[in-house]
């Protein structure tokens, strides 16, 4: 597909009078807002993927759902994510910081519940329902957060949103890799309980970082950071 696009799509002519590399090489290194957001993204994504790497194991061994019901809960995870993205689109424009904090808080709460279930090894219909609800909330919050954070990253550099998005994406991808590696080590040595607990802790660290940040989520429109 990439080869077809390279051979078939026409080349874009540069805008006259504009040097696309002028002043952009080191700009993002000095953008404190973007750097802070990228670090918080790295921490949060790492936490998410520490647990998400083993989501099937968590649903099966912690929540207690097996077989076809497990597939239905995974589908619920995805549907909740789509609903979460749609529901948070408008609040992100009006209250960007509060929206990100709300999603991080929901994600942290879901992972804390799952970590408690993993430690206590409770059983019963109520426990299964609580665990399933936590997984659905996990899906809604974790899927809504990436586009919210990417939009916030692009707003930190209106003169070069593509470059800002690139740095954000790099932090996100490193978080995926780091989370999977850390999660693998935790699960190999301690099982699901420490894996989910560490994931929850990293999400809480990211949430505290967002709460204490200043100016990171400011938008250049009538809406203000709240």
Image (spheres, rainbow, N blue to C red):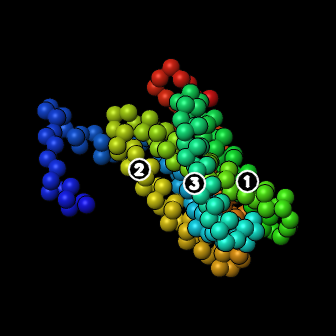
Q: Quadrant of residue 110?
A: bottom right
**Left or right of 142, for residue 172:** left
Neighbor class of circle 3 (other Cα within 10 Å; few <14, some 14-19, many 20+) is some
Q: How many marks?
A: 3
Residue sitting nearer the eye, 23 or 148: 148
Does the image show residue 32? no
**Sequence-earlier tag: 3 or 1:** 3
* Residue appearing at x 53%, y 55% in the figure: 42
- Circles 3 and 1 in contact, beta carbons < 8 Å: no
Q: Which residue is mark 3?
A: 78
Residue 164 position, x and y percent, is 39, 44
**Sequence-earlier tag: 2 or 1:** 1
Q: Helix or strand or loop: what does disc 3 sit on? A: helix
Does the image show residue 66? yes
Q: Helix or strand or loop: what does disc 2 sit on? A: helix
Separation of residues labelled 3 and 1 (CA atoms) = 13 Å
Q: Which residue is mark 1?
A: 133
* Residue appearing at x 44%, y 35% in the figure: 155
Q: Helix or strand or loop: what does disc 1 sit on? A: helix
Label placed on residue 167: 2
**Left or right of 107, for residue 89:** left
Separation of residues labelled 3 and 2 (CA atoms) = 26 Å
Q: Is label 2 or label 1 in front?
A: 1
Quadrant where the image shows the N terminus: bottom left
Quadrant where the image shows the C terminus: top right
């Amino acid at each position: 597909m990439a080869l077809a696009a390279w051979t078939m799509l026409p080349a874009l002519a540069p805008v006259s009078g504009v040097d696309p590399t002028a002043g952009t090489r080191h700009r993002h290194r000095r953008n404190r807002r973007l750097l802070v957001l990228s670090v918080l993204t790295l921490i949060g994504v790492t936490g998410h993927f520490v647990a998400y790497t083993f989501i099937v194991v968590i649903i099966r061994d912690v929540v207690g759902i097996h077989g076809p019901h497990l597939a239905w809960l995974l589908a619920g995870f995805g549907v909740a994510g789509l609903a979460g993205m749609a529901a948070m689109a408008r609040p992100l424009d009006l209250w960007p910081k509060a929206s990100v904090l709300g999603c991080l808080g929901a994600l942290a709460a879901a992972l804390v519940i799952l970590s408690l279930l993993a430690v206590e090894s409770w059983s019963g219909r109520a426990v299964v329902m609580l665990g399933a609800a936590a997984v659905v909330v996990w899906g809604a919050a974790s899927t809504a957060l990436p586009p919210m954070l990417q939009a916030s990253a692009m707003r930190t550099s209106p003169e070069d949103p593509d470059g800002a998005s690139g740095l954000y994406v790099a932090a996100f991808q490193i978080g995926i890799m780091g989370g999977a590696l850390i999660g693998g080590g935790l699960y190999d040595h301690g099982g699901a309980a420490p894996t989910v607990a560490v994931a929850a802790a990293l999400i809480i660290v990211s949430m505290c970082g967002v709460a204490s940040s200043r100016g990171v989520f400011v938008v250049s429109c009538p809406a203000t950071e709240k």
